[in-house]
Image (cartoon, rainbow, N blue to C red):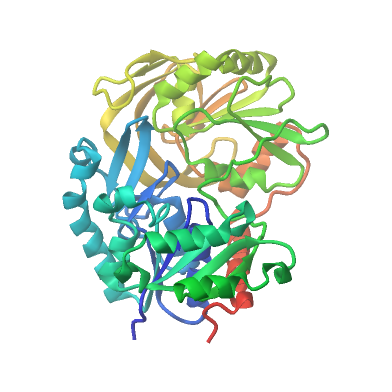
Amino acid sequence: MAKRPIMIMGCTSDAGKSFLVTALCRHFANQGLRVAPFKAQNMSNNAAVTTEGLEIGRAQYLQALAARIPPQARMNPVLLKPSAETYSQVIVLGKFHPEISALPWLARKPQLWPIVREALQSLLADYDQVVIEGAGSPAEVNLRQSDIVNMRVALECQADVYLVADIDRGGAFAHLLGTWMCLEPAEQALIKGFVLNKFRGDQALLGNAMDWLQERTGVPTVAIVPMVRHALPDEDTFHHRAAAVPGQINIALLLYPYASNLDEFDPLIHTPGVNVVPIRTLTSLQDFQAVILPGSKNTVESLRYLRQTGLEREVLGAATRGQLILGVCGGMQLLGRDIFDPSHLESGDSAGLNLLELTTTLAPYKITQQRETDWLNGGTVHGYEIHHGQTQAGSSVQPHLADGLGWQQANIYGVYLHGLLENTQYRQWFLEQVGWRGQAEDWAALVEAELEKAAQLVTATGWFNS
């Protein structure tokens, strides 16, 4: 028998909604329920590809794995991928929708809401339990008119809503009370509990604050979730500042504007003895063993940023010194000789860094598919493609991956295959090239263990225990 849907909303962005939905999906799956995640609209350049070749947010992809079901486009029917200051590519049910992408923000709701509602209702019909994630905060009263992801969804399915505050950043009780007060009476009635997330320290310090909050709202605090370190993919991975550390394998990850699919480097981040350093501003790359240029939703704009900041000179210097440089998808394209944009999909034509003899033309048709191919250093690798680019190789480059998915030229490597470093054998090879000595872990097995730990966290709080 289907249970009433559960919806996790946050007082702020980065309150931990995605993690909690992931944990709940595994918790309910462990109870034998057929459970599915749902997020009506996600804004992220971290995307994944389903077996059908459809794009969804990486968070919903992981949540489906937590639920032990195949990821499906209806779990994230609308995905916004920012590629300019005032423009986002709109992905609808897994496919780029140029007509809706061209509409003003407020004109999109009549087109998108029926799609969202149908996707939601289909999941409710097919699964015992649906766990829904909100976006940002439902207290953004200026966005109420265009809402298709927060209280509009909750009211549509009469979900039990749990409001989450990040207590680590401070002001949690004010956030919870203020958010509740910004809601309409019908919306307030759906709030079944408050959740204090990322708590560390002595719970006795909370005193009677939860009672104080319940007296004013009628809503109990149902869970206090401790701050935990985990290795699960995160949409907001790189909050920290870091620098090269002597004695470790230091890898520079260039975070230019519109960088995408950054979670694919998590296997490196969680490898002992490896220090992945986010590089946003002009920084010497001399002390790094490798430099990674990630994907980009606007390759030419990312390239302009490298030139404006002086990071282009640093990348060229690293190439001359023989440091290993890996470009993934858009990162590979900007390492090439030329980028042509005849359909004006991004920011026009540009000369690249000319470190790989590749020429890329951006085509209106977008390739999105899971792939398995031969890696020419040995073995088979799997991953996924998401790109408009069609790349031609010159005589100076050698194949690195089969099927036109990757090339190499001396110490410079470029690949179209996202998720490559999740392959244990490839990650082992990559790290050995830069001097690491160790045994690479099976990344899929590590993620599976982390999902179980997340579910146990829910159980330990007493939240939803029956």
Give the residue drawn at x 65%, y 40%.
240
Give the residue drawn at x 38%, y 25%.
391
Viewer-closest of 69 and 460? 460
In the displayed structure, would residue 446 be above or below residue 87? Answer: below
- Relative placement, left or right, of 437 versus 68 is right
In the displayed structure, would residue 309 be above or below residue 133? Answer: above
Pinpoint residue 226: horizontal percent, then vertical percent.
65, 65
Question: To which quarter of the image does residue 159 belong?
Answer: bottom left
Question: To which quarter of the image does residue 388 belong?
Answer: top left
Give the residue drawn at x 71%, y 26%.
288
Viewer-closest of 400 and 52? 52
Pinpoint residue 418: horizontal percent, then vertical percent.
48, 41
Pinpoint residue 97: horizontal percent, then vertical percent.
23, 42
Viewer-closest of 465 and 315? 465
In the displayed structure, would residue 186 be above or below residue 322? Answer: below
Give the residue drawn at x 48%, y 71%.
216
